[in-house]
Image: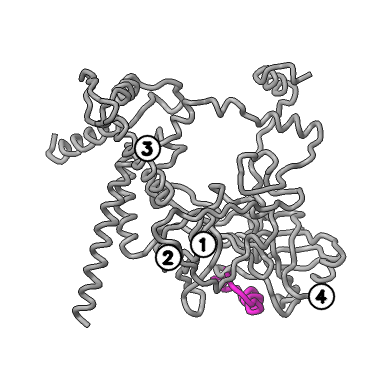
């Protein structure tokens, strides 16, 4: 075998080994966990802290004392909170939860590289579904070669370079939604005019609500976000219009940001609604497990992103110092 | 009667009684024959149609697939007349950077290509400016805002 082929084989096998460390069930439809996953959890329960490097044939140590366990718990809770905030702040760096069994670590690494390169040139502000953004896109057909749109973010989709978000606004009585690819080079700038969260992960119900809830002035000024505090949550409960609706909101009792999602149904409609009910889903722990990301996986990505952010911060500070020195 | 069965039995019973024989998709919101459409310029016919409440429908789409997209020319029935128009807003999901509207908007045009109205108050997608068809350019010159 040629040298490059040998190298490629080693590279791929090392990646596969890393992948095997993370995969938990045999296949995406399986109802069981692999032996090594269960063993790993058993060891963790008894006080081991090292997630990745434990070999299959090591014996368990029962060395954790009660006081240490309590301190450990507080630290763990803090770390848990950090991980949760990271998941909400950088959803583009997390893999898709519906395709976890088909994760490709090489693709994720390559995407991350390009995403960091883009983030060096474009400042992507912190925003969530429910925040009001202003996006300027390069447009060859407009007189000043730019096109600016202001709207409330109603959705954030996909992972990696495909990550996109949808902005909604009502302009001259016409409801408009535009989908933007976060990492598309045509975007000249993204500005978060008002940073806040809502009670739901998606706000499609705004299409069936009064237009006031989707109207934001195009010349809206930036509302400064409170520094050092948690992200403000706008717990408004929007009233739905009278039916007919664009979606069957009466079936979505999980949505917390709306009221009035009740409808009088005929006997046949009620029977049809029962067909699509899946009451066993809430008890399906394996499904939940298969679609969830483990904390150590998220921590691994978080460390990479934090390192990038630190480097960027340092680079910007140095650039500023240089500017001051030169002037 | 159904409440005395547990949920699994209920499910199988209902599935047996109300089984569908065909598959369906989510609504595509495509503009085709007999789609209802909203006239968005200040032409007299458009205003009359809005007041009377008679729906404006597409009866022909001038392209190969006969499925209307942004910028396509269509033939409409308004107030018992046949008029041509251009699609300037779609409810259909669009690609990135192309705006999606809450209503299907149309601008009326006569057979020579002259627009029937004098102004378009609704916002028009900026990507339509790429179209070099001279009749369409005349229509877009009436627009007040581009999105």
Distance Cα–Cα, label 2 vs label 3: 28 Å
* Residue identifier under label 1: B97
Q: Which residues are magenta?
A: B128-147
* Residue identifier under label 4: B44
Q: Which mark is residue A103?
A: 3
Q: Nearer the viewer, mark 4 or mark 3?
A: 3
Report helix, strand or loop for mark 2: loop
Q: Which mark is residue A186?
A: 2
Quarter of the figure that contains the N terminus of chain A: top left
Chain of residue at mark 1: B
Callouts 4 and 1 close, C-beta under 8 Å: no
Using a 10 Å C-alpha cutoff, classify the residue at mark 2 as few (fewer than 14 neighbours), some (14 to 19) or many (20 or more).
some
Callouts 4 and 2 close, C-beta under 8 Å: no
Residue at position x 74%, y 63% in the image: B38
Report helix, strand or loop for mark 1: loop
- Do the dots labelled 1 and 2 sit on one chain? no
């Amino acid at each position: 075998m040629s040298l490059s082929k040998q190298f490629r084989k080693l590279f791929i096998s090392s990646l596969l080994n890393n992948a095997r460390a993370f995969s938990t069930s045999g296949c995406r439809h399986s109802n069981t966990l692999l032996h090594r996953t269960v063993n790993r959890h058993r060891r963790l329960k008894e006080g081991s802290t090292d997630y990745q490097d434990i070999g299959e044939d090591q014996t368990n140590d029962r060395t954790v004392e009660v006081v240490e366990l309590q301190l450990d718990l507080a630290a763990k809770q803090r770390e848990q909170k950090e991980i949760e905030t990271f998941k909400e702040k950088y959803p583009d760096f997390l893999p898709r939860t519906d395709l976890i069994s088909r994760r490709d670590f090489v693709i994720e690494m390559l995407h991350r590289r390009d995403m960091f390169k883009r983030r060096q040139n474009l400042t992507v502000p912190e925003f969530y579904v429910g925040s009001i953004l202003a996006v300027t896109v390069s447009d060859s057909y407009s007189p000043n070669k730019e096109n600016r749109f202001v709207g409330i973010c109603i959705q954030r989709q996909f992972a990696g370079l495909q990550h996109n978000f949808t902005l909604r606004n009502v302009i001259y009585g016409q409801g408009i939604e535009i989908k933007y690819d976060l990492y598309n080079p045509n975007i000249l700038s993204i500005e978060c005019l008002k940073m806040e969260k809502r009670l739901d992960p998606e706000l499609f119900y705004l299409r069936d609500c009064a237009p006031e809830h989707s109207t934001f002035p195009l010349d809206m000024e930036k509302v400064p976000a409170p520094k050092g505090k948690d992200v403000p949550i706008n717990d408004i409960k929007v009233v739905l219009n009278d039916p007919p609706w664009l979606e069957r909101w009466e079936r979505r009792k999980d949505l917390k940001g709306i009221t009035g999602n009740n409808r009088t149904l005929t006997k046949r409609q009620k029977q049809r609604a029962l067909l699509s009910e899946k009451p066993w889903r809430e008890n399906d722990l394996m499904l939940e497990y298969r679609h969830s990301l483990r904390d150590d996986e998220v921590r691994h990505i978080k460390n990479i992103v934090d390192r990038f952010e630190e480097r960027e911060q340092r680079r910007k500070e140095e650039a500023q110092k240089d500017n001051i020195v030169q002037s | 009667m159904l409440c005395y069965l547990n949920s699994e039995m209920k499910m199988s019973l209902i599935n047996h009684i109300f089984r569908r024989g065909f598959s369906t998709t989510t609504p595509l919101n495509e503009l085709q024959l007999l789609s209802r459409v909203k006239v968005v310029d200040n032409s007299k016919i458009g205003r009359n149609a809005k007041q009377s409440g008679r729906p404006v429908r597409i009866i022909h789409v001038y392209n190969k697939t006969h499925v209307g997209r942004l910028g396509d020319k269509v033939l409409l029935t308004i107030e018992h007349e046949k008029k041509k128009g251009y699609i300037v807003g779609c409810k259909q999901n669009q690609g990135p950077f192309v705006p999606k509207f809450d209503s299907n908007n149309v601008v009326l045009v006569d057979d020579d290509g002259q627009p029937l109205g004098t102004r378009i108050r609704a916002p028009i997608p900026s990507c339509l400016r790429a179209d070099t068809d001279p009749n369409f350019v005349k229509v877009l010159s009436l627009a007040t805002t581009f999105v």
